[in-house]
Amino acid sequence: LATARFLASQKPDGSAYVIGDAGLYSALYNVGFTVNDVNPDYVVVGETRNYNFEVIETAARLVQNGARFIGCCADETDRLEKELVPACGSLVKPIEVASGKKPYFLGKPNPLIMKQALSMLETKPDESVLIG
């Protein structure tokens, strides 16, 4: 949701090549974005289990050709029960290496995400706490 809102504020009715699950697609559609793999404004990477070489190759090519590279979260691992699993920060690495460009992360600890959350919750920093 925060990624979609930020991108819509930067490029209303923009387009993105998305690597992520249904929630990310839905959030982008809800702010007026289209999803495509032909000259998108952004390559957006979230967490997903649908990740393969073809997706990496397409994303790297699009970033090399000028699409802005966005990561939803910088966390490299997450917990799934007792095991560590790759998170968004790990999924962006092959694209970063192949494209030569670093992603801009919108998730924690990016201050923009914190400001957006405070605004949505209609609260002040001194009345809030971040966990996670």
Image: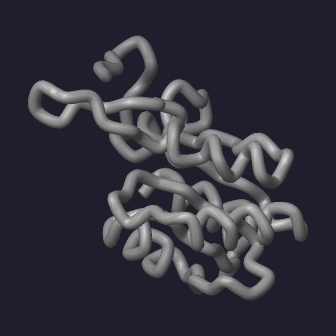
Q: Nearer the viewer, residue 109 or 60?
A: 60
Measured from the top left, where is residue 95 in percent x and y? Answer: 68, 52
**Which residue is more in the foreground, 67 or 111?**
67
Camera-side residue: 18 or 83? 83
Residue 59 pos. (x, y %)? 68, 66
For this view, does 54 lie left or right of residue 38? left
Where 10 sits versus 79, above or below? below
Q: Report the residue at 53% width, 25% height from top.
A: 109
Q: Residue furthest top?
A: 126
Q: Position of residue 56 (x, y in %)?
A: 62, 62
In this picture, residue 70 sits left or right of residue 115: right
Residue at image coords 70%, 42%: 104
Name the image colouring.
Answer: one colour
Image quarter where the N terminus lies is: bottom left
Quadrant of the rendering where the C terminus is positioned:
top left
Q: Residue at x 80, y 62 (%)?
A: 63
